[in-house]
Amino acid sequence: AMERYASIRDEPATARCGTTIGLHMNAGLIADLPSLPSSGAEGVGLFRTELQFLVRNQMPKRGELESIYSHVMDSARGKRVAFRTLDIGSDKVLSYMKPTDEPNPAMGWRAIRVGLDKPGVLRMQLQALIRAAKGRPLSVMFPFIADPREFRAARDEFDKAMERERILGHLLPESVEVGAMLETPSLVFANDSFFREVDFLSVGGNDLKQFFFAADRENERVRRRYDTLDVSFLNLLDTIVERCRSNGTPLSFCGEDAGRPVEALVLAALGFRTLSMRPASIGPVKHLLRRAHLGEVRGIIEAARNRGHHVREAVTDWIAAQPPA
Ligand code: PEP
Ligand code: MG
């Protein structure tokens, strides 16, 4: 599939209206990294660090993590990599951790909740990331932040880890960015101060959608029941874009929807300027964005909303009516 889009691989995703969308890739294993140059991604918008933990049968050591993260940064050759700290629990269970018996694991003890309650692993991970970055920029984001206090506590762990490294006389990262994943509706309605204190926000659309519609993303019976382009979800996304714009918060979207061309086009029309997706989606998404006029798409979306029509149908019809590339 990547060969089909090879001719635009090194071209920017600039729409006909002149707006450029940054296309980044999602990754989690060393084996994903060759896709960075071959896909034309500008960076890694989501590095799911739990995959390194899931492929083992014992807790990795700090030194091992440090060399893995260092290798990831080496392979990225200066492109930005947003490392997401451990997101376990829910559907991702570590064989070497005591199993928890929870009736609703997706809403249970997972991600940053585990990281803050049992901070040993989070601290080890942050130290490994800081050491791996030495002299290079470092970008870290915390998963499943549902309350600004969780972000503050996690960021505090990061600041303490930096301070420890400084006292030890180790070379620090050249610069740091500490962001949060926006994956629960609660965070959309957090105070402005939260939007100003994060260095960036990345929408985890898979989780955000499951909690918005109360529809388990793992449950075949319900997972396709609600459309990402449903008006109520688009209103939520509009609110996110507006709140980030008014507070000057850098925003990206990294759920699976970012890699679906029609959804990606709608996200761009709503105002998302950075999308992160599986590497094979970058070509098709870029191809469509380059043919589109975002203002026109925005108009199509507004008209469909006002008339109570399906946004998906209206946008799909608009795409079909465009002249070929
Ligand atoms: C998401 O929830 O959209 C996301 C990117 O994280 P994950 O799919 O790993 O939960
Ligand atoms: Mg998620």
Image: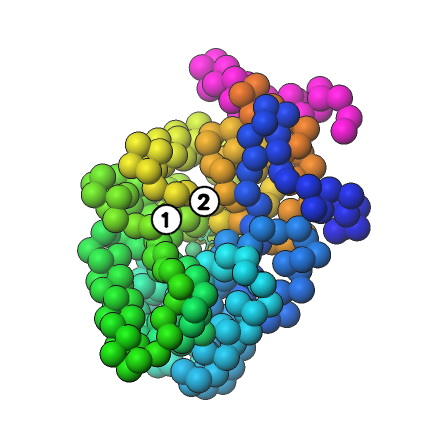
Q: Which residue is mark 1?
A: 200
Residue lying at 68% horizontally and 28% vertically, measured from the top left:
291
Q: Does 254 sit above or below residue 228?
A: below
Residue 57 is situated, as x and y percent measured from the top left of the image, at: 49, 85
Residue at 77%, 26% (x, y): give it. 324
Residue 87 higher or lower than 11, as above or below: below
* Earlier residue among tags 1 and 2: 1
Q: Secondary structure at mark 2?
A: strand
Does ligand 1 reach within 8 Å of label 1's beta carbon?
no
Q: Quadrant of ligand 2?
A: bottom left
Circle 2 is placed at which residue position?
252
173 in magenta: no
Tell me which residue sits at (25%, 66%) in the image: 159
Identify the mark at residue 92; answer none if there is no mark. none
Image check: 30 left or right of 227? right
Q: Quadrant of the C terminus?
A: top right
Element under label 1? loop
Q: Are marks 1 and 2 in contact (CB under 8 Å)?
A: yes
Type of residue at label 1? Phe
- Asked whether 307 or 283 is in front, the reply is 283
Three-letter residue code for mark 2 = Ser
| Residue range of the region highlighted in magenta in the rendering | 297-325
Q: Is residue 230 visible?
A: no
Mark 2 crowdedness (10 Å alpha carbons): few <14, some 14-19, many ≥20: many
Q: Is residue 28 visible?
A: yes
Q: Foreground residue, 299 or 305? A: 299
- Residue at the spot 26% in from the left edge and 44% down from the top edge: 196
Tell me which secondary structure the magenta stretch mostly adopts. helix
Q: x%, y% of residue 27?
A: 56, 61
307 in the magenta segment: yes
Please give left or right for residue 123 compared with residue 62 in the image: left
